[in-house]
């Protein structure tokens, strides 16, 4: 999406659970009619709220009359580069890997031609979801992932499987595949994130290695994988610890934690497992960990 694209965002409160279920299941043309549906670019749930993204001015008066289970709270109008902070950002070079934020098809096509002589490159179009690779927690997770797959660290053996819980736009999942994982599963509950991640699979021609599924991270807690990545808030990480998501994994990469939350997470984790902290990166706002199973 081009930085200057004007977005109209409807903020709706769902008066009961059935409202969100309706949005989740129905086809856009059935709910909004063909004209509005044509301009619909994304849907996002947050608690009892739904956010509808359109790239043209639309009138949802008829929809709100037909479905009084929704309450219109606010209409936001802003440019794409205001919504997606960092739109138009330059490539991110991490030595062994390059992340290229791509926000429209012409730019993407040009960057692909220029990438042939560069380090392994991942193209990320975040769409309306969070994450083009520039966030400090994402960059730290990428650096940890690169270290895991470096031959000098692992010799000739590379982890074959990776699980990215809360994959967002797919940056970490795609990086794992690019660095050497044979099978990667990325999971996110956000419609916007899953749509963006699946498009990025196509851009990067990695659909033979990476699968993106929509769902709660907690529902994938016991999915087998050598490497688990989780750049998500503490309340989800705590659930995952109690569900055994981090039991007996060769490597963990965990972020999305405020510095004072790091000790809380580590205490809960170490009560169940014996992990060695290989590296930890702390900024004034975030802390990220790379942990290895002591027996691995």
Image (spheres, grey):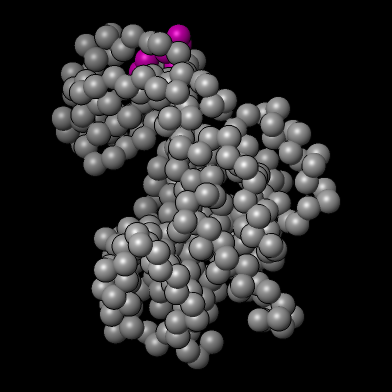
Q: Which secondary structure type mostly characterizes the magenta part of the structure? A: helix
> Which residue is at a point 47% across and 89% down the rendered structure image?
294
Q: Is residue 230 above or below residue 105?
A: below
Q: Quadrant of residue 282?
A: bottom left
Examine the rendering and report whether any part of residue 243 can be seen. Answer: no
Q: Residue at x 35, y 73 (%)?
A: 244
In the rendered image, residue 123, in percent from the top left (x then y), is placed at 65, 44
- Counting from the top left corner in percent of width and height, residue 270 is at 33, 83
Residue 224 drawn in magenta: no
The reply to whether residue 43 is visible in this rendering is yes
Q: Residue furthest left?
A: 15
* Position of the C terminus by quadrant: bottom right
Dividing the picture into quarters, in which one does residue 101 lie? Answer: top right
Residue extending furthest toward the right:
117
Q: Residue at x 53, y 35 (%)?
A: 87
Q: Is residue 47 left or right of residue 39?
A: left
Specify the farthest residue to the bottom: 295
Residue 245 sits in quarter: bottom left
Labels in figure, total: 0
Is residue 51 toward the left or the right of residue 171 in the image?
Answer: left
Above or below 189: residue 93: below
Instruction: Name the residue nearer the viewer: 78 or 273.
Output: 78
On-image quarter of the N terminus: top right
Q: Position of residue 201 (x, y in %)?
A: 63, 45
**Magenta region:** 30-37
Q: Is residue 124 above or below residue 289?
A: above
Residue occupying the point 21% across, 37% down = 48
Between 4 and 58, the one nearer to me in the picture: 4
Residue 232 placed where, x, y %? 38, 57
Residue situated in front as seen by the camera: 121 or 67 = 121
Q: Is residue 140 left or right of residue 17?
A: right
């Amino acid at each position: 999406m081009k930085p200057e694209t004007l977005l109209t965002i409807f903020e709706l409160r769902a008066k009961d659970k059935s409202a969100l279920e309706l949005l989740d299941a129905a086809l856009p043309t059935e709910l909004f009619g063909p004209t509005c549906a044509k301009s619909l670019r994304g849907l996002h749930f947050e608690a009892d709220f739904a956010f509808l993204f359109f790239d043209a001015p639309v009138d949802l008066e008829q929809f709100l009359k037909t479905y009084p289970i929704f309450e219109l709270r606010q209409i936001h109008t802003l440019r794409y580069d205001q919504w997606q902070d960092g739109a138009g950002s330059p490539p991110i070079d991490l030595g062994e890997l390059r992340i290229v934020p791509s926000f429209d098809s012409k730019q993407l096509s040009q960057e692909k031609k220029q990438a042939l002589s560069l380090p392994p490159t991942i193209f990320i179009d975040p769409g309306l979801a969070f994450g083009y690779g520039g966030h400090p927690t994402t960059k730290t997770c990428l650096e940890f992932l690169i270290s895991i797959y470096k031959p000098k660290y692992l010799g000739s053996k590379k982890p074959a499987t990776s699980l990215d819980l809360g994959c967002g736009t797919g940056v970490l999942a795609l990086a794992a595949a690019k660095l050497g994982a044979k099978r990667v599963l990325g999971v996110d509950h956000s419609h916007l994130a899953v749509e963006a991640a699946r498009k990025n699979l196509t851009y990067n021609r990695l659909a033979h290695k990476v699968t993106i599924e929509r769902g709660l991270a907690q529902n994938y807690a016991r999915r087998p994988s050598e490497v688990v990545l989780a750049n998500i808030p503490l309340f989800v990480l705590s659930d995952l610890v109690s569900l055994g998501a981090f039991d007996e994994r060769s490597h963990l990469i965990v972020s999305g934690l405020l510095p004072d939350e790091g000790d809380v997470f580590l205490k809960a984790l170490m009560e169940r497992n014996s992990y060695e902290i290989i590296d930890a990166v702390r900024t004034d706002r975030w802390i990220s960990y790379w942990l290895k199973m002591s027996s691995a």
